[in-house]
Image: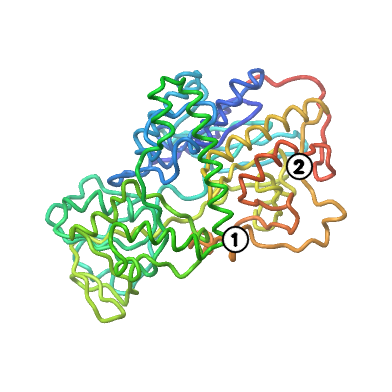
């Protein structure tokens, strides 16, 4: 890409600028269009189309690890299997765009470079580049709705192991899956133990000479049928799909709440239940050796394995699991610290991703560079000293989109409150009673500690020890708490009386 050197072109002013056209951004656009039609808005998306994760990831078998009755939007019934493929999710999002005429609001291939807030103008100025031409554009907006997700889409995380340069085969990260990769008859090693590895293995096992899952430590999985009985029964009775969606959604949320509470209150019982589910496929010996984690359930995300496909591949002999540490790569494979060697033609590093804090955009407030790690978060949505900005950061123990819908409700309430007060600026600030509050890490590592968060925790805003100054990760509490937020609380600071004139887009 060649970036033009001429002065940026003004591309217009909008009441709200949405960053990202993934699952959160499309939801935000829907809520603005249908519930606040008098407000102008634009969606800027780096990629060539909508979808975010579901567009970026091209590896075999890419699918959701949350059920679509809760990962889908509350306003759009899901009519397919609960665990869906990337293409099914893209089709669903495309329907939302088409049915609500959102396409004209989305500008693809626009990478945001900088976002600068001016208190003198009460505006965000956003500098972006059109990736196809290199043209620089500037947008102004009264409010930023950050829906860009939380990891870098253009590259995954691969640790540096000794000897990687010596390996004569191919090393591939699932996030940048090469379309020319031919695994037929190849010996493949997948490094990793999470949802990506669990998805990949059964979807390439039939093509490979053999595939080995190499993990440093086991993780929890939930195997089960990719179906929900009550949904099937209601469809048999010709119940309207909107009713089915709501009923099944409530059932799934109830079950999720119960499971999460039990994982905390009776972790050993839940652990044994999870292990029994795996053992039903591979037997107790393999379960104990390779699928018994050392931590209690829900300290890391638990992936659903539809129809136990991962375990059936292992049971069939087409795949195997090795639990060990890597000593180094060799020309022909990987040598383990146990002394064992794994021969490989292809090594797939399903080792996670790199966190992206607010899209890696260069933020400034009144000319001063902004370090989000120095701010304190208000319920994981707003940040002290950062005006007119809300970030959608979803749940780890529940579907991401559940929070996207709740945050949308909050944003629309907040915009209406600003209008009612004649305010052009709103920010959050610590109240006098909060000044001595301890500054803690974004997430309590004793409660949830995946590697991508641990590696980048210093980049994230701080939390306090009070409910309003942290992201609780508890949907079942937040679904009641967020709608009840008192927007007149002293934590909200409104400024900049609106002179009454509205700038045209």
- Residue on which disc 2 sits: 427
Q: How is the image coloured?
A: rainbow
Q: Which residue is at a point 40% across and 49% down the rendered structure image?
A: 304
120 relative to 306, above or below: above
Residue 254 x/y as whole percent:
56, 42
Mark 1 lies on residue: 265
**Nearer-N-terminus badge (2/1):** 1
Residue at mark 2 to residue at mark 1: CA–CA distance? 37 Å
Quarter of the view holding residue 8: top right
Residue at 29% x, 63% y is: 283
Q: Position of residue 116 (x, y in %)?
A: 65, 42
Provide the secondary structure element on which disc 2 rests.
Answer: strand
Report the front residue among 170 and 60. 60
Where is the N terminus found, in terms of image quarters?
Answer: top left
Which image quarter: residue 47? top left
Look at the picture and state if 393 lies above or below 435: above
Residue 407 on image: x %, y %: 63, 37
Q: In front: mark 2 or mark 1?
A: 1
Q: Regarding mark 1 in the picture, which secondary structure is present there?
A: helix
Q: Give the answer, above or below, for where 27 lies relative to 357.
A: above
Which residue is painted at 48% across and 55% down in the image? 301
Category of crowding for the residue at label 1, using alpha-carbon neighbours closer than 10 angstroms: few (below 14), some (14–19), many (at least 20): few
């Amino acid at each position: 890409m060649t970036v033009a050197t001429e002065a940026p072109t003004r591309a217009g002013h909008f009441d709200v600028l949405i960053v990202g056209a993934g699952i959160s951004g499309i939801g935000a656009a829907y809520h603005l269009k249908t519930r606040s039609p008098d407000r102008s808005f634009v969606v800027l998306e780096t990629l060539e189309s909508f979808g975010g994760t579901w567009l970026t990831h091209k590896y075999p078998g890419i699918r959701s690890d949350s059920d679509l009755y809760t990962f889908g939007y509350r306003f759009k019934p899901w009519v397919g299997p609960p665990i869906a493929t990337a293409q099914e999710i893209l089709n669903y999002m495309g329907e939302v765009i088409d049915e609500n005429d959102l396409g004209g609001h989305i500008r693809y291939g626009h990478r945001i470079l900088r976002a600068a807030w001016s208190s003198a103008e009460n505006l965000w100025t956003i500098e972006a580049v059109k990736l196809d031409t290199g043209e620089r554009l500037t947008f102004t907006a009264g409010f930023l709705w950050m829906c860009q997700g939380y990891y870098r889409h253009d590259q995954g995380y691969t640790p540096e192991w000794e000897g990687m340069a010596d390996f004569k085969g191919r090393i591939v990260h699932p996030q940048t899956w090469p379309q020319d990769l031919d695994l037929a008859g190849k010996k493949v090693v997948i490094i990793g133990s999470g949802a990506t590895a669990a998805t990949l293995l059964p979807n390439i096992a039939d093509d490979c000479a053999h595939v080995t899952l190499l993990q440093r430590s086991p993780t929890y999985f939930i195997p089960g049928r990719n179906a929900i009985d009550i949904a099937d029964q209601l469809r048999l009775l010709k119940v309207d799909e909107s009713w089915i969606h709501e009923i099944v959604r409530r059932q799934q949320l109830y079950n999720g709440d119960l499971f999460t509470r039990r994982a905390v209150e009776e972790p050993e019982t839940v652990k044994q239940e999870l292990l029994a589910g795996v053992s039903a496929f591979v037997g107790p010996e393999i379960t104990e050796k390779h699928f018994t984690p050392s931590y209690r359930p829900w300290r890391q995300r638990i992936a659903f394995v539809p129809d136990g496909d991962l375990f059936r591949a292992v049971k069939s002999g087409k795949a195997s699991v090795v639990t060990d540490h890597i000593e180094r790569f060799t020309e022909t494979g990987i040598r383990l610290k146990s002394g064992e060697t794994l021969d490989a033609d292809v090594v797939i590093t399903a080792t996670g991703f790199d966190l992206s804090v607010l899209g890696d955009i260069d933020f400034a407030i009144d000319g001063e560079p902004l370090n989000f790690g120095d701010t304190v978060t208000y319920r994981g949505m707003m940040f002290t000293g950062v005006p007119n900005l809300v970030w959608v950061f979803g749940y780890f123990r529940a579907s991401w989109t559940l929070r996207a819908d709740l945050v949308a409700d909050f944003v629309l309430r907040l915009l209406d409150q600003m209008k009612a007060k004649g305010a052009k600026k709103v920010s959050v600030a610590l109240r006098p009673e909060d000044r001595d509050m301890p500054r803690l890490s974004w997430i309590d590592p004793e409660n949830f500690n995946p590697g991508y968060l641990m590696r980048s925790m210093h980049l994230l805003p701080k939390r306090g020890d009070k409910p309003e100054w942290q992201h609780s990760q508890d949907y079942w509490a937040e679904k009641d708490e967020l709608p009840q937020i008192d927007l007149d609380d002293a934590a909200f600071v409104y400024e900049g009386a609106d002179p009454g004139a509205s700038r045209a887009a």
